[in-house]
Amino acid sequence: MSLDPATVRRMAAEIDAAPHGHTAVVIAELAKRYGVSAGTVYRLTRGHRAVASRSGRAAIPDYREWVQVAVRWAARTGAVLEDAIEAAVAAGDLPPQALAMPLSTAYRVRRELGLAPSRKRTQRLHADYPWQAVQIDGSHSAHMAVLERDGADGDWLLKFHRRRISAGGYKNKPLPPGRERVVYYSIWDLCTGYVEARAYVAQGENSADALDFLIGACQPSEDPRLPGHGVPEHLWTDQGPLFKGAAAAELLEALDIEVVVGLPYAKTRMGGVERSHRSRWRRFETALGLRGETILLSDLNSRLREYDARENARRPSRTPVGGRPVPRADAWAALGSRRPAERPLVAMPPDALAAAAQRARRRVNNAGVLSWDSVQYEVPDWHDCWVICRRPLVGAAAAAGRIAVELEGSKPPERREARPLQIRPYGHVRAVPASPLEKLLESGAPDGRADVYAPAPAAEAGPPRLMRKAVPGAPLDNPLRVGGAYASLEEALGEFAELYPWPLSPGLLGMVGAEIRDAGLDRDAVRSLARELAAVREAS
């Protein structure tokens, strides 16, 4: 139904003259009077009313400015909008008329200006190719508790509990004397979602277990269902042992792995690996209860490896291959072609963990003794100097308590092996102990004969393994290596030239080479010879 313009103008005038809050009542009376709907009255009078409708801008233009000032005040402490308006009026930033602004109008204006607080929005994590970025994290088991060590091989006996173990502790689940727990370490690829995990028994997360898992997960696997191998480019972690441990930081820097660390308790950015923990508790651990209550740690890891292989072969990759969803393991092998030529896949050195060590700066006193963690060590041939001490995380040297010390500022670095100080009994004259060579020669020559180049039996050839080729990794400078020999005479003469910069005649150069060759290309012998010749030249 349509009304004449004069009638529409009279309707609009009555609506404008309505008291505040009675607009809807007046519109309903007009609709009843003229036999139309309320929506028709709104539509016909929209362009003839002096006051803007609720769907448009605010009736008073100052409302927009007042709301912006109030929002700035609310952003300081997170106060609600009405309290922010009162505070702005008390401070003189808003006029007293702002207190009469309806709160519903203020909230509506805030929404129209886009100033209303919104929910935190996240962006999906993504990587261009496998092993460009990985997430690694450790978490305590939700259903497995440690009982005791089983047998002489040092394996651990674990027990399955149907009820989940809370994060606060082991309620009604006694801990062993060392308070050990089951800790899972997981690595998750941002490109494909490929995941691997391993269980350890320890008092908590530590650098040694985290590095052992990382290096093991980056080694080639005999199972073709687990194709992940090589050194990752970026390592995402929380502020755990890989971030706080000096030994881990030094090894990751040597491997050219960039560590990306987020803020504490920022679970969103580590959501991929955190999600793998929850799936492992719900599916893998609960399924272990079907086989019995107890299990050995080695058996747990073998079944965990089978679980990861099945998950990677069944779950679809985060990044499709050729526009089609494929399993994670297949996608990891197929998407390797996306790697740029300047960033090839580098193989993980097999002995990388041997180069990881705790580091500390200590001073050797006049007696050739230093102290580290309340333990005294005896350093051969060095007195009254500063040294860099390194203690291995794993291996026989760690079990024996030996450390490696490096003379601070020496180039190339000079290293010695330090052992715990052995206190000699009273009356024993302290002398220089016999060198290993002297002890060996005193033991006498071996008896018997040996065929050094006897043909070795041919090894049985197995089936060839198909694996993506990885370029060989650069050799690591093991900071725990003490002494040693050069690989060739050229390398030894090159370092001799750095220590003795003066030119040598061909005859003298031949004598130096013969002397180095007779010394077995020993590093210490080259340094000693360079110092002797330098002292003679300076004296002359």
Image (cartoon, helix red, strand yellow):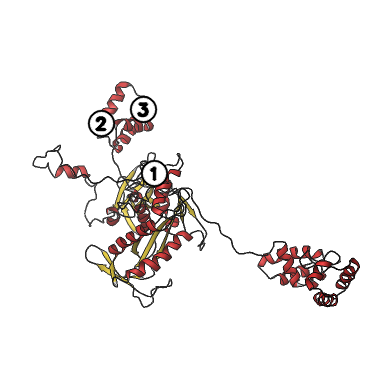
Tell which circle, 2 or 1, labels the residue nearer the N-terminal end. 1
**Residue 197 rendering spot, x and y as whole percentages:** 37, 59
The kind of residue on which mark 2 rests is Arg
**Residue 77 rendering spot, x and y as whole percentages:** 66, 67
Label 1 crowd bin: few (<14), some (14–19), many (20+), radius 10 Å: some
**Residue 381 rendering spot, x and y as whole percentages:** 30, 45
Residue 428: tell me if it is visible: yes
Mark 2 or 3: the one toward you? 2
Q: Is residue 456 left or right of residue 503?
A: left
Query: Could you tell me which residue is drawn at 41 percent across and 65 percent down?
Result: 279
Label 3 crowd bin: few (<14), some (14–19), many (20+), radius 10 Å: few
Mark 3 or 1: the one toward you? 1
Residue that label 3 marks? 537
Depth check: give the residue in front, 135 or 22.
22
Residue that label 2 marks? 517
Q: Residue furthest top?
A: 506
Query: Which quadrant would the N terminus be assigned to in this image?
Result: bottom right
Tell which circle, 3 or 1, labels the residue nearer the N-terminal end. 1
Asked if marks 2 and 3 touch (Cβ < 8 Å), the reply is: no
Query: Could you tell me which residue is drawn at 30 percent across and 38 percent down?
Result: 524
Residue 532: tell me if it is visible: no
For the residue labelled by badge 3, is the local secondary structure a helix, a strand or a loop?
helix
Q: Is residue 124 left or right of residue 530?
A: right
Depth check: give the residue in front, 449 or 310.
310
Query: Could you tell me which residue is drawn at 37 percent across and 43 percent down?
Result: 470
For the residue labelled by badge 2, is the local secondary structure a helix, a strand or a loop?
helix
The kind of residue on which mark 3 rests is Arg
Tell which circle, 2 or 3, labels the residue nearer the N-terminal end. 2
Residue that label 1 marks? 346
Label 2 crowd bin: few (<14), some (14–19), many (20+), radius 10 Å: some
